[in-house]
Amino acid sequence: MNTPNDTPIKTPCVQVCFVDPKVGLCVGCFRNMEELARWTKYSDAERDAVTNALPAREKAYRNSKST
């Protein structure tokens, strides 16, 4: 029987874990240090909100590196 605790937590992790110290973001998933540390404590809604923000963070990060 499955319980809520048996359900895997969705994660944007791509197993490329390197935090750019200048911006404080993981350049694999684009979460910040607080989000990485608290991910398992977040509600589904909190995780969804962060996940939805990641494409814009990635774009901004890549744009800042190309200039």
Image (spheres, grey):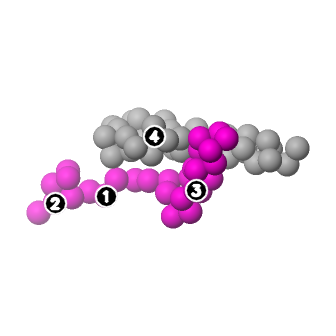
Amino acid on which the number 3 mark rests in the picture = Phe
Which is more toward the observer, 65 or 48?
65
Q: Are marks 2 and 4 in contact (CB under 8 Å)?
A: no
Can you identify the residue that label 1 sits on? 8
Give the number of the disc on residue 35. 4
Quadrant (top left/top right/bottom left/bottom right) for the N terminus = bottom left
Secondary structure of the residue carrying tag 1 is loop
The residue at 39%/36% (across/down) is: 45
Distance from the alpha carbon under mark 4 to that under mark 3 = 14 Å
Amino acid on which the number 4 mark rests in the picture = Glu
First along the sequence among labels 3 and 2:
2
Amino acid on which the number 1 mark rests in the picture = Pro
- Left or right: residue 18 versus residue 8 is right
Q: Which-is-in-front pick, marks 3 and 2?
A: 3
Amino acid on which the number 2 mark rests in the picture = Asn
Q: What stretch is highlighted in magenta?
A: 1-29
Give the number of the disc on residue 2. 2
The residue at 53%/41% (across/down) is: 32
Question: Dividing the picture into quarters, in which one does residue 42 lie?
Answer: top left
Q: Are marks 2 and 1 in contact (CB under 8 Å)?
A: no
Magenta span: helix, strand or loop, mainly? loop
Can you identify the residue that label 3 sits on? 18
Bin the neighbour count of mark 3 within 10 Å (Cα to Cα): few under 14, some 14-19, many 20 and up: few
Rendered location of residue 30, percent (x, y): 59, 47
Secondary structure of the residue carrying tag 3 is loop
Distance from the alpha carbon under mark 3 to that under mark 2 = 34 Å
Rendered location of residue 16, percent (x, y): 56, 62
First along the sequence among labels 2 and 4:
2
Secondary structure of the residue carrying tag 2 is loop
